[in-house]
Amino acid sequence: SSNRDAIIRLLVQEEDENEVRAALYTGISYLIGVAFPVTPYFLASSSMVALPFSVLLAGTALAVVATFVSILSGISIKKKAVEMVTTGLGAAFVSYLFGHLMEALFNVSAL
């Protein structure tokens, strides 16, 4: 049927995408994104001093990106910012808990 054919064309649509350009954009975006939470660790006297600044900078960066996304897509800035900051910082917290679990299970320390 025509609906099935349209869905198949939509799902397997071929595009002339420049893989090198996509890889460069991804890599540059990653480096910019990782700079925010990592920078305090290079500047602070200890990791415990750097941690709150890292969380603050990561949350701020997520909120700025959420603002751009919401403006470009026409959705609520507040809703998108809360969604991205909650998801991003929540994922960081889950990763932190996972690290503690691995320390407990394997008797190793990352510090």
Image (cartoon, rainbow, N blue to C red):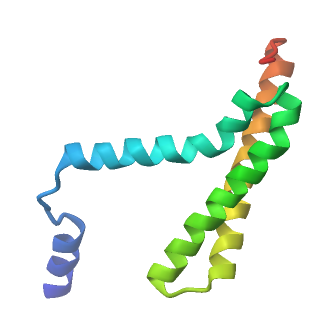
Q: Residue at x 19, y 71 (%)?
A: 8
- Name the quadrant containing residue 97: top right
The x, y position of residue 14, in whole percent, is 13, 61
Depicted 33 relative to depicted 77: above or below? above
- Residue 29 spot, x, y in % from top left: 44, 49
User: Which sits in the foreground, 17 or 101?
Assistant: 17
**For residue 96, above or below residue 4:** above
Q: Considering depth in this image, is 44 or 2 the residue closer to the camera?
A: 44
Q: Residue at x 63, y 75 (%)?
A: 80
- Side of 11 relative to 45 (left or right): left
Q: Is residue 93 visible?
A: no
Count of marks, rendered view: 0
Q: Is residue 41 visible?
A: yes
Q: Based on the displayed image, in which of its 4 quarters is residue 27 positioned?
A: top left
In the visual, does 79 lie left or right of 11? right
Q: Quadrant of the C terminus?
A: top right
Answer with left or right where residue 2 lies relative to residue 105. left
Residue at image coords 79%, 14% = 106
Residue in view at x 65 percent, y 66 percent: 63
Tell which residue pokes out farthest to the top in this image: 107
Find residue 26 and report its horizontal and vertical position in percent: 38, 47
Task: Give the image location of residue 99, x and y in percent.
Answer: 77, 29
Q: Nearer the viewer, residue 1 or 71?
A: 71
- Determine whether, in the image, residue 94 is placed left or right of residue 70: right
In this rendered view, identify the residue nearer to me: 22 or 107.
22
In which quarter of the view is residue 43 placed? Answer: top right
